[in-house]
Structures are given as C-alpha cells and as structure tokens.
C-alpha cells in the first residue's frame, strides 16, 4: 500500500489539479457560463439529509444491483467522459481496466482517445457505448456497428463488447464553457474517426476554441426524436437516453422505446441554470413509472450522494469527474481507488441508515427541502 493515499474524491481532485496543465484541468473541471449548475449539482446533494435507522442488524450489506439484466456489485458506474489521454497516457484502456476490476460498467465516450476495439480487447467487462449523432450520420452509424459487432465477436458473449448504446441527447450544440474558450482548448480528435472523418487542425483563433469549431462542424442542431427512431432502426442494442431532466421528455423517451433514462445535465457543461440533477430525479422517476430504469449523474462525490439518489428512485448513478481525477492523479490505480472509495462510503451509509440491500433504501430514508417545509 502506498502511504498517504487520498481518502476521498475531493483529495483526488486536488491531486488532479496539481498533476494536470491548467488547460486540461479546466476542461475536465469546468462547466458552462456562470457555472451556476456546476455548483448546484453538488450543493443540491448537500441540502438532502439522511434519516438513519437504528438497531437493525447490518452485519451484512449487499450493495449489488442489476442494470439491463447485468449484475453489478454496486450501483456506481462510470459516466462517459472524453479524452482520457489528457489525464493518463493509457487513456480509456486504463479506465476500462479500473472499471473491470470493480466489476462495474464503463460507458465509453464517443470522444475517446483509445479505439473502441482496443478498449473492448483490453479486459473482460460489460460496457456501454456513448453516442453522439453527428451531422455525418454515416460516422455515427459506423461507430454503432463497430461497437455492436464487438459484442457479437466476443469470446464470452456475456462479458466482452458493448451491450447498450447511451445516446446523449443534451448536445445539439455545444454549451459555452468559458474556460475552454479562454484557454483555446485543443480538443483531440478521436482515433475512432480515422479514415471516416478529417478535421482541419489550425489552432483556435477568434470565435472560440478549436474544440468549439470541431463541435460546430460535427454536432447536429437538427437532432430530434426522429433520430432516436433512426438509431433504433440501425441497431438491436438497447438504447438509453442521456440528458433528460423533465417529466415531459422522460415520458417521450419511454414512448420512443428507450431502454433507460439517464437524468443528466452533462455535468453542467451544457445549459447553465438547468436544474441540479438530484432535484429533478424524483420528477423523472414518477413520469417513467417503472417502465424502464432511471439513472442519474452530476455532482456525485460521496457514497451518501449515491444513497440519496437510490432513495429518490435511481437504479444506478454514474460518476464522471471523480474517475477522471483518479486517472489524472494515479492512473488506473487511482480510477479504481475512486470507485472503491465511493463503494465503501455507500456501504457505510447503508449500514448507518439500516439498509442491508439497495432494495431496502427507500424514500423514507431521505429528507429533501420539500419534505422539511
Ligand atoms: C463529460 N460528459 C460527457 N458526456 C457524454 O455523453 N459524452 C462525452 O464525451 C462527455 N465528455 C465529458 C468530458 C468531461 C471532461 C466531463 C467532466 C464530462 C458528461 C458526463 O458523461 C457526465 O454527464 C458528467 O460528467 C457527470 O457529472 P460529474 O460526475 O462529472 O459531476
């Protein structure tokens, strides 16, 4: 064991800040515009209190759950975040190994720095593939087929390859992340696009960062519910919709045949003043009414946050920046440690709330601001 290992996500964030060039730390850490939603994603968890229950035998805590039929030892999975080589030279392969060591699901970003084939063959694990539907539908379609065929070619069909598509629906245009604009953030092109798409590599000038120009050329502002239909027509993988924060859209997602809904504001990187995700989770869960699993991400930094999300109806939570911090600070071992620490925190929170399984975590275990009025 190394000495002086960080004991929580905040300490990993500090280490990441020291380890990374400012431009890259700002890219990972930053949010859109005033960063109101960025602060609120975390602050809103702080306004929810727990209701501990006592004198319950908690000598055995089972945090396991299932998602789309896959077993996981805990409800914490890895959110899709782009460009892991900014944090570590092994990039998404290191993250994939960390997630696999924790037996949890990693959602691989469409903007990854490692090829999907390389990630798929790096280790045995159930993984999901995050998709942007680009203006160039053929590029998106090709990546979906590649992800799907890796699943079919897997030595052990149940463990290798990509088992679901996570379609990100909150990014028809790129949010204004002012740190990236100021830093003229250079966004590395994913090797997955080699041979499919090229991009002029001029350094960013006036009018925004190179990253913004890339987004303008690729992202499709005409994205609509018809594209969900289109995606369904080209893949047999289940499709989860990521970036839903209202009951209206949650109902539409279910009607459109989504296999799951992910309550997300993209880690506050898209629309500033969008609500913190934990504050709208219950609304979405009610609208979905058990038809499909609901997940949530944004601001989860503690096992107690995970507990709160479960109590408000989430089937699982995704963590983005914490894993990135771990990767930046200590590579694969750091990413793994972050997940393990949060698992341990969740275990303690469950024990102290008298919950021996995730099924025992209920709405009665939390007090929201609404409850206290
Ligand atoms: C992201 N996120 C993201 N989402 C997505 O669908 N595709 C992507 O490529 C990325 N890339 C990305 C990069 C970085 C550096 C960050 C921080 C985030 C959003 C991500 O999936 C998730 O919604 C948030 O990160 C969750 O919030 P926390 O856990 O970071 O607070």
Image: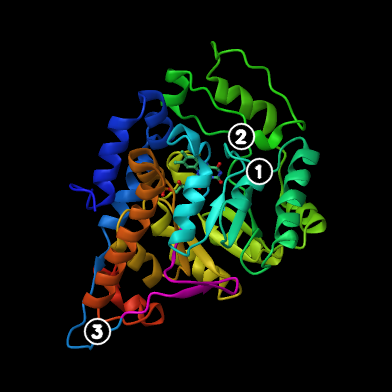
Residue at the (61%, 34%) spot, across then down: 173
* Residue that badge 1 annotates: 132
| Mark 1 sits near ligand 1, with its Cβ under 8 Å away | yes
Q: Is residue 222 left or right of residue 166?
A: right
Residue at the (32%, 50%) spot, across then down: 42
User: Alpha-carbon neighbours of circle 3 within 10 Å: few (<14), some, or many (≥20)?
Assistant: few
**x, y percent for residue 334:** 35, 48
Check the image and tell me how it is coloured: rainbow
| Foreground disc of the pair 3, 1 | 3
**x, y percent for residue 143:** 73, 45
Magenta residues, as a range? 61-77
Visible in this render: residue 373?
no
| Quadrant of the frame with the C terminus | bottom left
* Residue that badge 3 annotates: 59
Q: Earlier in the sequence, mark 1 or mark 2?
A: 1
User: Alpha-carbon neighbours of circle 1 within 10 Å: few (<14), some, or many (≥20)?
Assistant: many
Give SS at disc 3: loop
């Amino acid at each position: 064991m190394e000495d002086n290992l960080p004991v929580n996500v905040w300490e990993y964030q500090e280490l990441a800040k020291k380890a990374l060039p400012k431009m890259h730390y700002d890219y990972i850490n930053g949010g859109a515009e005033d960063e109101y939603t960025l602060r609120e994603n975390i602050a809103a968890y702080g306004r929810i209190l727990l209701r501990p229950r006592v004198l319950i035998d908690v000598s055995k805590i089972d945090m396991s759950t299932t998602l789309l039929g896959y077993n996981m030892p805990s409800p914490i999975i890895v959110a899709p975040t782009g460009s892991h080589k900014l944090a570590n030279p092994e990039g998404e392969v290191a993250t994939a190994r960390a997630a696999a060591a924790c037996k949890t699901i990693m959602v691989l970003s469409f903007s990854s720095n490692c090829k999907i084939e390389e990630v798929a063959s790096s280790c045995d694990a159930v993984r999901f593939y995050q998709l942007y539907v680009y203006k160039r539908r053929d590029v998106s379609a090709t990546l979906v087929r590649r992800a799907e065929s890796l699943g079919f070619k897997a030595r052990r069909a149940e463990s290798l390859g990509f088992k679901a598509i996570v379609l990100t629906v909150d990014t028809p245009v790129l949010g204004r992340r002012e740190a990236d604009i100021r830093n003229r953030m250079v966004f590395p092109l994913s090797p997955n696009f080699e041979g499919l798409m090229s991009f002029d590599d001029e350094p960013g000038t006036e009018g925004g960062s190179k990253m913004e120009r890339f987004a303008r050329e690729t992202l499709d502002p005409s994205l609509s519910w018809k594209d969900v239909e289109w995606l369904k027509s080209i893949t047999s993988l289940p499709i989860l919709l990521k970036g839903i924060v209202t009951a209206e859209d949650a109902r539409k997602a279910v009607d459109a045949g989504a296999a799951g809904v992910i309550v997300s504001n993209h880690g506050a990187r898209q629309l500033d003043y969008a609500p913190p995700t934990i504050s709208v989770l219950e609304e979405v869960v009610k609208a979905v009414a058990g038809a499909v699993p609901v997940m949530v991400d944004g601001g989860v930094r503690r096992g107690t946050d995970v507990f709160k999300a479960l109590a408000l109806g989430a089937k699982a939570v995704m963590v983005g920046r914490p894993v990135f911090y771990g990767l930046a600070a200590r590579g694969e071992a750091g990413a793994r440690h972050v997940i393990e620490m949060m698992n341990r925190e969740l275990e303690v929170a469950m024990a102290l709330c008298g919950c021996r399984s995730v099924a025992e975590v209920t709405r009665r275990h939390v007090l929201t601001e609404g409850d206290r009025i």
